[in-house]
Amino acid sequence: MRIAMVAYAFYEGNARIQQYATALARRGDVVDLILLSRSGSQQAPFETIHGVNLYRVQSRPLGSESLIAYAWRVFLFLLRSSLLLTKKHLVNRYQVIHVHSVPDFLVFAAIIPRILGAAVILDIHDILPEFYGSKFGGGKRSKLFEFLVFIEKVSIKFSDHVIIANHVWYERLLSRSVKADKLTTINNYPNPDIFFPRERERFDRKFVITYPGTLSWHQGVDIALRAFARISSEIPEAEFHIYGNGAERDNLVQLANDLGLGGKVKFQDFLSIEAIAKVMANSDLAVVAKRAGSTFGNEAASTKIMEFMAVGVPVIVSRTKVDTFYHSESTVKFFNSEDVDDL
C-alpha cells in the first residue's frame, strides 16, 4: 500500500507520528511524510529514516508566534504540501492520505487525491478550537472559537474517517461535529523500543526533577517553578531540569531568576525522542503541572506521564479531568491543579 502523511510538525519530536509511520513501513507499505524542518537546523529537504520518506517542505522557527504569523506559515504549508501531494499522487497513486492535525483544515491538502479515489484520514492530536483558544486567547464565546468549530466540522465532513487522541475529546467531538461510526480513539502510548527501564548513567548526589515538553502557559511550568522555590533550600542537592521550547520560555527563565533559583534550574533546548528518553530515565522525579483552569490543559492527555512510568521514574501530576480519567493515586501522585502549596 502507498500511504502519504501530512503534518505541520517536526518528525524528530513527535512520537505519535513516528510510531504510525514506522509501523506502516515495517509492514512493507510505502510511506511518504510531508512535514516541517526546524529553522537553522540544516535538515535535509528529503531523507529516509527507518523506511519512512521525509519531505521537509518548509521551515518553522522555535518560540512564540503571533496569530497572523502562525496563520501565514500554516497557509504556505497547506499550499506546498498540497502541490507536492498532488504531484506525487498523479505519478503513483496513494491509497490513503493520513493528515495530522493541528490544524484540521490541512486535510484539504488532499483534495485532488481524494477526488481521484484516495481515502482521507484526519488524525486530531489536539482539538482545534480549545487548542487555539489556549494558544491565542480566544474564549468559548468568541467569534474565533465559533469559526474554529465550523472549520472542525467541515474538515471532518471532508474526511473519510477521524481519529481522536483521547476519550474526553471523543465525547466532545460526538457532541458537536461527528457521528460515532466515523470516529475512533487512539491514545498516545510510549514507544517500547525507546522508553524502557535501563541502567542509570548518572551517579552524582543530585536530586534531579525533570520536565520535558512544550513551554506553554497551560502546561503550568511556572507553577512547578514556584513550588520548587519553596523546597529548594530544604533539599540543597535538588535541581529542576526543563527541556523544551515554547512561547513561555523567556518568561520562565525570568521567573527562575526572580525566584533566586540561579543554577538550580537548568533550561535545555529540544532533544530528539531517543535523547530525551535517556534524560528521563536518569531523573529522580518528574512533574506534570498542567492548568485545569485552561480547557485545553484540563483535557489534553499527557503522554509524558506514561513515558516516565515506562522508564521507571515516579511522577507528580496535576489533578486534571483527562489525567484523573486515565490514572489514579495507585500509579501517580496527584496535587490540586494550580495550587503551589499542594504541589
Image (cartoon, rainbow, N blue to C red):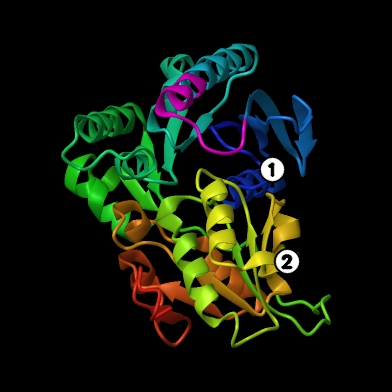
Q: Position of residue 245 (x, y in %)?
A: 60, 47
Q: Indicate left or right for 44 with 152 as reference.
A: right
Q: Quadrant of residue 121?
A: top left
- Work out whether residue 309 can be spotted: no
Residue displayed at 70% across by 42% down: 28
Could you say which is closer to the camera, residue 102 or residue 165?
Answer: 102
Could you say which is closer to the camera, residue 50 or residue 214?
Answer: 214
Q: Indicate left or right for 196 with 95 as reference.
A: right
Q: Position of residue 215 (x, y in %)?
A: 53, 51
Label 1: element kind: helix
First-in-chain label (2 vs 1): 1
Label 2: element kind: helix
Could you say which is closer to the camera, residue 40 or residue 75?
Answer: 40
Q: Three-letter amino acid code at disc 1?
A: Ala
Q: Does 211 lie within the magenta span?
A: no
Residue displayed at 58% across by 17% down: 89
Vertical position of residue 136 compared to residue 299: above or below: above
Name the residue beneath numbered marker 2: 279
Q: In which quarter of the image is the C terminus?
A: bottom left
Vertical position of residue 118 compared to residue 196: above or below: above
Count numbered badges in the picture.
Answer: 2
Which residues, given as a range, are shown in magenta? 61-73
Q: In which quarter of the image is residue 219?
A: bottom left
Could you say which is closer to the camera, residue 82 or residue 132?
Answer: 132
Q: Three-letter amino acid code at disc 2?
A: Val
Name the residue beneath numbered marker 1: 25
Residue displayed at 62% across by 52% down: 244
Q: Does 68 lie within the magenta span?
A: yes
